[in-house]
């Protein structure tokens, strides 16, 4: 029998969990970042802004990191569950709406906190999210859902088949 302390395996386990969470956060930030940078680029070209300032892409990446964290919080609070009888799409359709509402709620809170940082009132800053226009918030919701939906499908396939099989299907096997 080896001479190890009781806390050592848990410490290693915690370290591995943190490493896995960091990988998930980084991957999800890259995924959201690609979307948000593309949307930012389209918006800048639609406004015919020349030259296009690079700082807007930095803000898009920051927003991606925040959104990724919100998504991971939503997954921790409401884990993905696949019912093999209903299939991945049917199993995740309701959950995608829940995640969307969670991310929207956190974006409202983020707007309130951003307002506080800039010396404004929390509630009025929350109301200013999406310029306070319900149609714009609805359009943003559709866009957020279209961004989140493929990610959830990927996570559902990953959960159903396992990480190795999913990556082999998407990128080929390492053989």
Image (cartoon, rainbow, N blue to C red):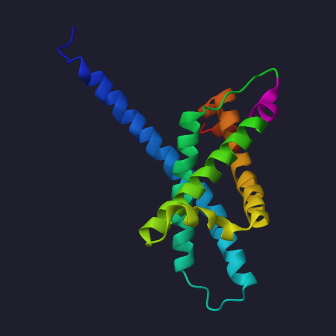
Determine whether 138 is above or below 119 in the image.
above
Task: Answer whether residue 166 is visible to the viewer in this image.
Answer: yes
Magenta stretch: includes residue 10: no
Pick the residue in front: 87 or 130: 130
Most common secondary structure along the magenta stretch: helix
Residue 83 position by quadrant: top right
Determine whether 12 is above or below 20 in the image.
above
Name the side, left or right, on which 46 lies relative to 10: right
Residue farthest to the left, as pictured: 3
Q: Residue at x 57, y 68 (%)?
A: 60
Pick the residue in front: 48 or 102: 102
Residue 75 position by quadrant: top right
Q: Position of residue 46 (x, y in %)?
A: 75, 82
Residue farthest to the bottom, as pictured: 50
Quadrant housing the C terminus: top right
Q: Which residues are magenta?
A: 86-92
Name the side, left or right, on which 74 lies relative to 133: left
Q: Position of residue 14 (x, y in %)?
A: 35, 31
């Amino acid at each position: 029998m080896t001479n190890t302390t009781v806390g050592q395996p848990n410490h290693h386990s915690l370290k591995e969990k943190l490493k896995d969470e960091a990988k998930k956060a980084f991957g999800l930030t890259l995924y959201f970042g690609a979307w948000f940078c593309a949307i930012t680029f389209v918006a800048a070209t639609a406004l015919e802004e020349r030259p296009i300032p690079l700082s807007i892409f930095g803000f898009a990446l920051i927003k991606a990191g925040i959104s990724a964290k919100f998504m991971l919080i939503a997954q921790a609070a409401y884990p993905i569950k696949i019912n093999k009888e209903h299939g991945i799409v049917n199993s995740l359709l309701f959950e995608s709406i829940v995640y969307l509402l969670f991310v929207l709620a956190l974006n409202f809170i983020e707007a309130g906190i951003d307002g506080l940082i800039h010396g404004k009132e929390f509630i009025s800053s929350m109301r200013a999210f999406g310029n306070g226009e319900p149609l714009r918030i609805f359009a943003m919701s559709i866009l957020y859902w279209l961004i989140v939906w493929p990610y959830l499908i990927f996570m559902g396939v990953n959960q159903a088949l396992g990480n190795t099989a999913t990556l082999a299907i998407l990128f080929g096997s390492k053989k």
